[in-house]
Amino acid sequence: MAPRKHTALGSAIFLYSALAGAQASDIPTFAHRSPPAYPAPIGTGDGVPGWSEAYSKAQAIVAQMTLAEKVNITSGVGWEAEQCVGNTGSIPRLGFRSLCLQDSPLGIRFGQYSSAFPAGVTIASTWDEGLAYRRGYAMGVEHRAKGVDIQLGPVSGPLGLFPEGGRNWEGAGSDPYLSGVGLASAVRGIQDAGVIACAKHWIGGSDLPERYRIAGEGANAVNESLSSNVDDRTMHEVYAWPFADAVRAGVGSIMCSYNQINNSYGCQNSELINGILKNEMGFPGFVLSDWQAQHGGVAPALAGLDMSMPGDQDFTSGNAYWGGNLTVAVLNGSVPIWRVDDMATRIMASFYKVGLDKDRAEVSLDSWTTDVHGFRNWFAKENYQIVNGNVDVRGTHGTLIREIAGKGTVLLKNNGSLPLGKLRQIGVFGSDATDNPRGPNGCEDRACADGTVAMGWGSGTANFPYLISPLTALQNKAYADGSVIQWVVDDYATGEMSKVARQAEACLVFVKAQAGEGYLTVDGNQGDRNNLTLWANGEEVIRTVAADCDNTIVTVHSPGPVTMEEWIDHPNITAVIFAGLPGQESGNAIVDVLYGLVEPGRLPFTIGKTASDYGVKLMYKPDNTYAPQQEFTSGLMIDYRHFDKNNISPRFEFGFGLSYTKWDYKSIAVRTINAGPYTPSTGRTPAAKTTTVTESPESLLFPAGFHKVKNYLYSYLDSTSQYGLTGSYGPNDDAPKEAYDPSGTPIRPAGGAPGGNPELYDVLWEVNVTVANSGQRNGEEVVQLYVSQGEHDDPVRVLRGFRRVSVKAGEWTSIIFQILRRDVARWDVVSQNWVITSAPKKVYVGRSSRDLPLEADLN
């Protein structure tokens, strides 16, 4: 019998946008097309530590579920339908409550009695893998105690290609290796605490205003979301690289992005989900959509999407692509039953992997009200109860937050004025030094730049339990030291600034920039920054103070690079500090750095002299009214790689940061490890165990007397006749036949295990480096290792190792780095595998990407 068409389940652009050549006549022809990759690989934990037992448990419980129950845990119940920013359906018959998904990557969004951790850009600036793990673990502990099952973090994408990018601060810098280490460390920490981590955003997110089609967010002038057009090699070596680290670390879930990639939506791009993520990277976990990033029903399911969030097509609309519609799609053959089995099994395997079946806390937060009592079903105004239990989950995390914020502060310039000693009189200048008059949480999702800036804005935020401003901390320090302290925090009161500056022994200027997510606009900046200049009259504040104070120390709080050329070389500016987005302990942390109580960090990105030096141009206005096309023409050459390849002198290079002591790099020795040859993977992904639906449509109707909560999304059917479920049907004929093949798919040569072919992680060389602290103070150095891969189209050098080490004054330490096969390989687009060319390769070790005193050949 001919299959039925289900247009309600189709894509908003076209049903199978991952199909080469599949386009309607009214769709413009674009050069970039993502190829198809079907069927969706079935997840497995066979032979994978941490996953094997979890899969056994998951398969056992999924075998007990009805079709409606399987659909229930794959489908969100709708925006504001329950207490978390996202909730799946529940399975009361099996005693399984809904899964709670909650932002953010730096704390519990909308949380109370919870912490506001330093942002991703600040933990990246520590260059400390151990601190990244401890931060992840602490956040996981807090989420777990509040009843959160899936923490929507950590973040890698966007990677920072565009320095003005509004959400760069959520991630771990502008290098794939640094980002990958940070992502993996956070994943281990979060999941060791018993919460499923969600690495995001898969993949290639860039400009915010055109990233998605939602009216009221400035993007309603275009028909479809922006397409990030990325070539195959760049995808593998740059943007996908950190996610491979996360998969290898055991991440339970990955969030697909709003944007299109090569003109196929991220959440129904079969090549990216089925092909690269689930086959080539061997990802055993589940893929969930960003909120409203789903654009169809059948297409995303066949392309590998496993969970729809928040469930409704438009917020609080009551309409869903999945839920009951997915149940229908299975019954009529548009989506095979084994695909839904796999969705449910992947979700439950992640659930068991982190131990959520043991001591699972009740949800004690609410995303829609700060009141103790409220409606569990907020939009429907039903089930009034205690929704905010106000469980205090912070523990002693403030101490960790202060340590991270201090060690993630970067000292850019120091003419000897730092560290400070006891001062007779201090002057403090700029609104960035003080409190927001409306309070630390006075702006929606932190969308303002009033007072000191300690996190960006958007969904990646958390409520501050408190925020120690620099001025507060400096007053406390002045009181302890017996210093006089005066301040002018009106950014336009330049006359008063001059008077105070002339009296002070040290003038501490605090300036800022801010950025965030595109659903909120601050001072004309719709998420992305309009430029790289300072906000709030910052340049004029600096000039004013420096004109009257010969010991001016500038601190910048910012989500990323700012241009400094018009003031950085002023002779009266004796020190410059980049303090990033430090979280709730901001002021205490900056005092720790100013007075030398902690060793500062290193830059996770390049600070150029001009915005044009980065060689990229962010798209502020769409280039067409159908689907804006963002060409990633920089390829592999992002950030410092671009500066190096084009011989552009930055103001401060990637990895740069001054120390309070002196370091000498003494020696380097390379030892070759005989790891054996690289063998492409073979075999097939598992075959489906169940291929036939045994349940009748009548058994999936709403139970008699069932109470429907308004706009709540269910997996049951209202009737059978309205869907035409009167017979048996086969695959949807708009879909590729391969999508319905239950026998599995060949494993790609670069696959074979979580993170890719296991032999990619073989050690090929060990590099032994000796570093001495020849200064007068104990200190911490960030030792960085770079590799030159040798081909003309390769970057000059790429980061392939780092270590933050503590060494006492006058002593030395030996550090051993391991260089993996993956570290010197490149992606070959012909063989679709990793290869090592015969070009000569070298290793470089030093203090930054351009300060590398040690080098050696890799033979």
Image (tube, rainbow, N blue to C red):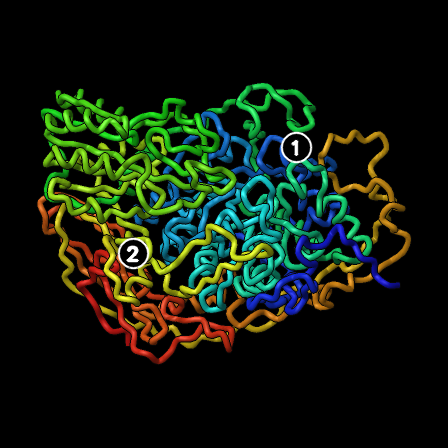
Q: Position of residue 468 (x, y in %)?
A: 32, 27
Q: Mark 1 — residue?
A: 81
- How many residues crowd mark 1 within 10 Å: few (<14), some (14–19), many (20+)? many
Q: Quick check: can you spot residue 142? A: no
Q: Residue at position x 26%, y 59% from top?
A: 849
Q: Mark 2 is on which residue type?
A: Phe
Residue for point 66% across, 56% down: 13
Q: Regarding mark 2 in the picture, which secondary structure is present there?
A: strand
Q: How many numbered marks are there?
A: 2
Q: Which residue does the image show at 78% across and 54% down from the upper left?
A: 6
Q: Tell whether 111 sits left or right of 453.
A: right
Residue at the bottom extreme of this rendering: 838
Q: Secondary structure at mark 1?
A: loop
At horizontal 48% and vertical 30% (from top left) the residue drawn is 444
Q: Is residue 5 left or right of residue 823?
A: right
Which callout, 1 or 2, points at the residue further toward the start of the chain?
Answer: 1
- Depth check: give the residue in front, 490 or 465: 490
Closest to the observer, 579 or 774: 579
Q: Amino acid at mark 1?
A: Ala
Pick the quarter of the image with the N terminus. bottom right
Q: Quick check: 30 above or below 157?
A: below
Between disc 1 and disc 2, the foreground one is 1
| 119, 762: nearer the viewer | 119
Q: Which residue has dot 2 on it?
A: 802
Which corner quadrant holds the C terminus?
Answer: bottom left
